[in-house]
Image (spheres, grey):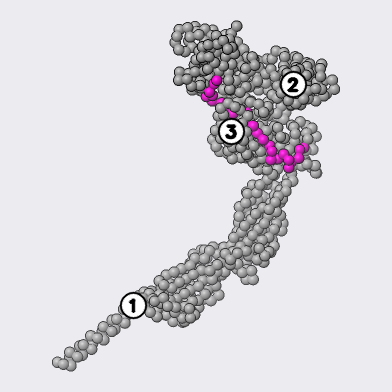
């Protein structure tokens, strides 16, 4: 009995010992808590910098494996080997397939690739210095290597000819350790017609190489750089600028501006039979960001194409030429391009006109972009460096909607009266005929108010604001009463007539009604008569009447007869004199004129403007024309046609009593 119990105890102890020793035998990676055995969770796999080896012409990256046990102690003499996956998992190589950890528990593999891409590196570790049939431990940590290099492409300077630009390009090649020195590289540009010279070479001590690019086009270029031995090239997109012009955009109007998003664009100019007009924008969109002169002038810059588009042959058929204007337009849909129907707001004329010229064959002096002083066949080429960043534009024809109106009486004896602004049936009314009130041609009232001792009051004592005609009349009603009008440049304008008049409210209705007595009509501060248009359509191209005075635009437009102008230049032409003025001289005027400086008349004579709009008039029988200077005031003394109206500012309207 005693022997049986003793044997049972021994067997029990033996079985406990065996059970304890065999606890982890089937868990291949659960060695984290056992001293002396590799820990899958505590061991490390770390990546070093990816570098390009100039001598071996390959991309390399070190992988450092650190094997520790469950207590964090380094394990020496254990075999480790990398396992690759990812894009380059099948193509990367290593100098050693298996390494043995040193006294610090580390082993360093050198991973090589001749292509760009990603590879994930995992590491297996053995419990001995070789890999036998036992299942190895897979370290939980992994390392991802992005085999790549970087390039930096910078244009240093540029010069331009009429058919190409030359850019000095600097290419810098780097890896994760810094510039790659002494590497053989090849360069490329995917743009049609572009050439790099040299197209290959060796990087300097800063990893750089300089190459000259010649190309017929600016804009986006895609450059490529290839390292010797590396299958994958590196690309970089660079925006190359052509010649540039710059300037300011300012407001030439004092009345409320109505543009949505003003942008600066480049438009080609068509010069035909002495007329200047704008065509569509140039073939490539050359536009600025939105500019807002509110109220301070706004800066703009335009990057030009290397070659001027839409060139035409001149009369001699030896030169291709194009003239271009810097134009401000209202980008109503905010798409960074001009679309038909968008208002043109202003155009440059004061500091030079852009002109591009190229030879049909051979060479040509001053080929390429130039700034000239006029649109004429004989022009002066201005100094580019002095003028190209000073091409200023003034907004002179912004749409005017719902302006506030101030009114004054021409006589101090006035005490009180009612005023009305109304749409008149222009299809029945003569422009200079004020009898439309008696004929009941008024289509709609836009605003009413009271003038008391030279102060305009509405019901709540606020300034009168004219309502948009579109808000009080339908499109069909407007079409029924609108008419066409010839502007001083000979262009047709479609408009609705608007009038302002004072009246006696005989029926005490508080508004104008048929039968009320009209007492005063619209005038202007110098005694000239005038009227107001609501412009519905006008030729969007003709803008060259004046770049410094208010011009035709949409919405409300006050007009008065052009009785005077400002002399801009006077040139002797034998017995005649060519007098240029602002605004442009009236059409079909044949009569006398006087030139005033200060309070006195300094010159007088006969003046003829002819039927063709222009910027100069011919003076004959001129007395003292040699005394005329720029800035003098010229007065037209004859009768002007109704179409020879000057556009005025929407500040204060003068009411004059009817005789």
Q: Position of residue 297 (x, y in %)?
A: 62, 35
Nearest to N terminus: mark 1 or mark 2:
1
Does 502 appear above or below 305? above
Residue 24 numbered mark, or none: 1
Instruction: Left or right? Give the position of 476 relative to 203.
Output: left
Part of the protein shown in magenta: 381-406
At x 17% / y 89%, what residue is drawn? 5
Q: CA distance from mark 1 to mark 3?
A: 83 Å
Disc 1, SS = loop
Q: Position of residue 397 (x, y in %)?
A: 61, 28
At x 60% / y 35%, what residue is drawn? 296
| Pick the front one: 462 or 432 | 462
Res. 132 visible in picture: no
Residue 597 numbered mark, or none: 2
At x 68% / y 43%, what residue is drawn? 244
Q: Position of residue 279 (x, y in %)?
A: 66, 32
Residue 295 numbered mark, or none: 3
Q: Quadrant of the N terminus?
A: bottom left
Does the magenta run of residues contain 385? yes
């Amino acid at each position: 009995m005693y022997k049986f119990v003793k044997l049972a105890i021994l067997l029990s102890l033996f079985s406990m010992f065996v059970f304890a020793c065999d606890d982890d035998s089937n868990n291949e990676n659960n060695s984290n808590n056992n001293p002396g055995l590799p820990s899958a969770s505590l061991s490390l796999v770390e990546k070093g910098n990816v570098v390009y080896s100039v001598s071996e012409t390959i991309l390399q990256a070190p992988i450092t494996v650190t094997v520790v046990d469950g207590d964090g102690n380094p394990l020496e003499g254990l075999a480790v080997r990398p396992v690759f996956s990812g894009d380059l998992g099948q193509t990367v190589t290593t100098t050693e397939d298996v390494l043995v950890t040193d006294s610090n528990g580390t082993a360093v593999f050198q991973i090589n690739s001749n292509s760009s891409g990603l590879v994930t590196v995992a590491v297996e570790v053995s419990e001995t210095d070789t890999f036998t049939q036992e299942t190895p431990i897979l370290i939980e940590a992994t390392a991802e290597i992005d085999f790549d290099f970087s390039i930096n492409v910078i244009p240093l300077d540029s010069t331009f000819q009429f058919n190409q630009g030359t850019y000095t390009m600097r290419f810098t090649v780097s890896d994760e350790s810094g510039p790659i020195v002494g590497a053989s590289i090849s360069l490329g540009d995917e743009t049609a017609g572009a050439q790099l010279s040299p197209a290959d070479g060796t990087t300097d001590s800063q990893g750089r190489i300089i190459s000259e690019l010649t190309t017929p086009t600016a804009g986006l270029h895609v450059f490529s750089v290839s390292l010797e031995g590396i299958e994958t090239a590196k690309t970089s997109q660079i925006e190359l600028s052509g010649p540039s012009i710059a300037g300011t955009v300012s407001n030439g109007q004092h009345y409320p501006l109505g543009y949505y998003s003003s942008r600066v664009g480049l438009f080609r100019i068509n010069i035909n039979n002495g007329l200047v007009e704008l065509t569509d924008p140039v073939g490539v969109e050359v536009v600025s960001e939105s500019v807002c002169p509110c109220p301070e002038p706004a800066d703009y810059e335009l990057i030009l194409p290397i070659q001027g588009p839409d060139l035409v042959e001149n009369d001699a058929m030896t030169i291709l030429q194009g003239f271009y204007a810097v134009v401000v337009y209202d980008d109503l849909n905010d798409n960074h391009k001009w679309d038909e129907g968008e208002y043109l707001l202003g155009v440059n004329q004061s500091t030079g006109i852009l002109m591009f010229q190229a030879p049909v064959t051979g060479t040509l002096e001053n080929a390429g972009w130039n700034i000239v002083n006029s649109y004429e066949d004989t022009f002066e080429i201005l100094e580019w460096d002095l003028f190209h960043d000073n091409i200023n534009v003034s907004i002179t024809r912004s749409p005017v909607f719902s302006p506030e109106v101030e009114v004054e009486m021409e006589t101090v004896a006035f005490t009180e009266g009612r005023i009305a602004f109304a749409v008149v049936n222009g299809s029945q009314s003569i422009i200079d005929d004020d009898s439309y009130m008696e004929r009941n041609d008024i289509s709609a009232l836009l605003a009413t108010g009271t003038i008391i001792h030279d102060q305009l009051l509405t019901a709540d004592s606020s300034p009168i604001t004219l309502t948009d005609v579109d808000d009080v009349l339908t499109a069909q009603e407007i079409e029924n009463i609108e008419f066409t009008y010839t502007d001083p440049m000979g262009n047709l304008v479609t408009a609705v007539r608007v009038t302002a008049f004072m009246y006696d409210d005989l029926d005490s209705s508080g508004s104008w009604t048929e039968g009320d007595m009209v007492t005063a009509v619209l005038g202007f501060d110098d005694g000239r008569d005038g009227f107001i248009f609501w412009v519905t359509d006008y030729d969007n191209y003709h803008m060259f009447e004046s770049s410094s005075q208010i011009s035709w635009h949409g919405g409300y437009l006050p007009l008065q007869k052009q009785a005077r102008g400002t002399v801009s230049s006077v040139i002797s032409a034998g017995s005649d004199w060519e007098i240029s003025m602002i605004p442009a001289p009236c059409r079909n005027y044949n009569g006398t004129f006087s030139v005033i400086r200060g309070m006195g008349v300094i010159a007088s004579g006969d003046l003829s403007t002819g039927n063709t709009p222009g910027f100069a008039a011919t003076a004959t029988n001129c007395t003292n024309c040699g005394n005329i200077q720029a800035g003098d005031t010229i007065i037209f003394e004859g009768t002007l046609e109704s179409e020879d109206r000057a556009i005025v500012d929407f500040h204060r309207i003068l009411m004059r009593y009817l005789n």
